Amino acid sequence: MAKELSRREFMGAGVALAAMPHVPEIWIKRAVNPVVIASGNGHQFRNGGEETCVQTAFRLMTSGEDVLESLVAGVNIVESDPADTSVGYGGLPNADGVVQLDSCCMHGPKKWAGGVACLEGIRNPSKVALMVASETDHHLLVGKGAQEFARAMGFKIEDDLNTEKSRAAWLEWKRRMDPSHYLDPAKRGGSETAERMADEGWFDPHHVWGTINCNGINAKGEVAGVTTTSGLAFKIPGRVGDSPILGAGLYVDQSVGAAGSTGRGEANLYGLCSFLVVEELRRGKHPKDAGLEALRRVAANTIEKRLLDENGRPNFGLNFYVLDARGRHAGVAFRPGSRYAVCDEGGARLETCEPLYV
Ligand code: GLY
C-alpha cells in the first residue's frame, strides 16, 4: 500500500513539510492511506453540526491529532445526538427506564485499552473509556464505580439521559410486557416486543441492539478503535453486551488491524469475535473474509430454536467492521442490506456490507 506522497497529501497527513525543506517529495513514503470506518450511523448523524462521525475523525486524524482521540471525538457526535436512540444521550433505556451505557476503546501503538459498562448519567461514555485507558491501571470499570471515576475526572453527571422519545418508547414497552417476563424465558418475548415496536415506527429497527463502532488508521499506520452503545433496548438492568468487552465489541492489534461490532451482543460475546476477526487477519485473511469467518462461527454456535429462522440461520443481526494494518476494510453482516461508513481521501460515503447469506 506504500505510495509516493504528493505535497498536498503530505500536508493532509498533518506533517510539516516545511520542517524538511530538502527532502524531495519523491522520496517521501507514506506507510498507509489514512482511513476511518464505522457502522452506518457513523455517516448519518451530525448532532446539528456539519460533519458526521467519520468525517470528524478523519479530519482530526489527518490534522495530526492522536488516532484514538480523533475516533472518540467522532463517536461523541453520535453519542450526543438525541436522534440516534442506540447510543449515548437518548439511547433506549433498560427495563427500569434508566439509560445505561457501555463503551470501550483501544489504542494500537500505545497498547492502551479502557472500557466502562452500565454507566449512568454521562452522555459520552467513550470519553470515560478513554480516561480509563489513559489515566488508570485498569481496563474496565462498571456501574457506580465507573460513574464515580467519571465524576472524579470532572465529568458532569446528569440525572437522566432519556429524551421524550426514548421515555415514550420505554413506557409503551412497559405497557405491553407481561410483568412476569423475567421468570419464564419461553414467554418473555422481550426483544420481540421491541422489534414489533420498531416495525410500528417507535424507533429505528437497527436500534434494538444499536451501537456505533469506529476504527481508523492514520498515515503513520497507527491503528485504533472505539465502540459505544446504550445496549439492548429495555434490557434487564445491569445487562452488559459485547460493546465494552475487549475482544468482543472491539479488538485492536497495532501490527494486524482492528475489528468491532454492532448487533446482538450475546451472540458475539460467546465467541469473542472481534478478537477472532483480528486473529484471522493475522493469518493473512482479507478483512472481508476475516469478518465472514466470525459470522460463520456465530452461526455454528447458534442452536436455540428461538434464535433461528425457518432456514436454521440466526434470526438476529450482527455486523463486524474490519480494518487491517494496510488500510483495507470491510463490513460484514448475515444478510444483504447493511452499509458501513467510510471516510478517506475520496471523502465520506456508505459502502455495502458483505452478506454471509445471499
Ligand atoms: N451490541 C450491543 C449490545 O448488544 O449491547
Image (tube, helix red, strand yellow):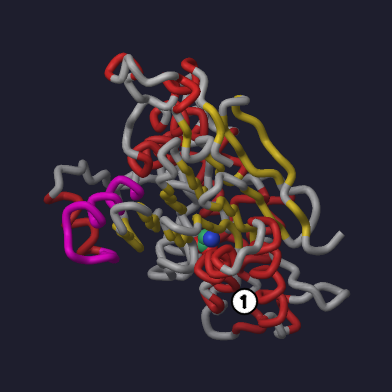
Residue 267 in the image: state x and y as whole percent: 60, 73
In the image, the segment drawn in magenta is: 125-143
Q: Magenta-highlighted stretch: main secondary structure? A: helix
Q: Nearer the viewer, residue 110 or 17?
A: 17
- Whether residue 134 is situated above or below residue 310 in the rendered picture: above
| Residue at 54% from the left image edge and 66% from the top image edge | 282
On whether residue 205 falls in the magenta region, the answer is no
Q: Crowding at label 1, few (<14), some or many (≥20) Cα neighbours within 10 Å?
A: some
Report helix, strand or loop for mark 1: helix
Q: Nearer the viewer, residue 95 or 281?
A: 281
On whether residue 128 falls in the magenta region, the answer is yes
Q: Quadrant of residue 308?
A: bottom right
Q: Residue furthest left?
A: 152
Residue 226 in the image: state x and y as whole percent: 42, 50
Q: Is residue 205 left or right of residue 96?
A: right
Q: Is residue 267 visible?
A: yes
Q: Is residue 234 visible?
A: no
| Residue at 56% from the left image edge and 49% from the top image edge | 169
Look at label 1 and name its amino acid. Arg
- Whether residue 56 is situated above or below residue 109 in the rendered picture: above
Q: Nearer the viewer, residue 12 or 6?
A: 6
Q: Quadrant of the C terminus?
A: bottom right
| Residue at 35% from the left image edge and 62% from the top image edge | 118
| Residue at 64% from the left image edge and 69% from the top image edge | 294
Q: Which residue is mark 1?
A: 188
Residue 276 in the image: state x and y as whole percent: 55, 71
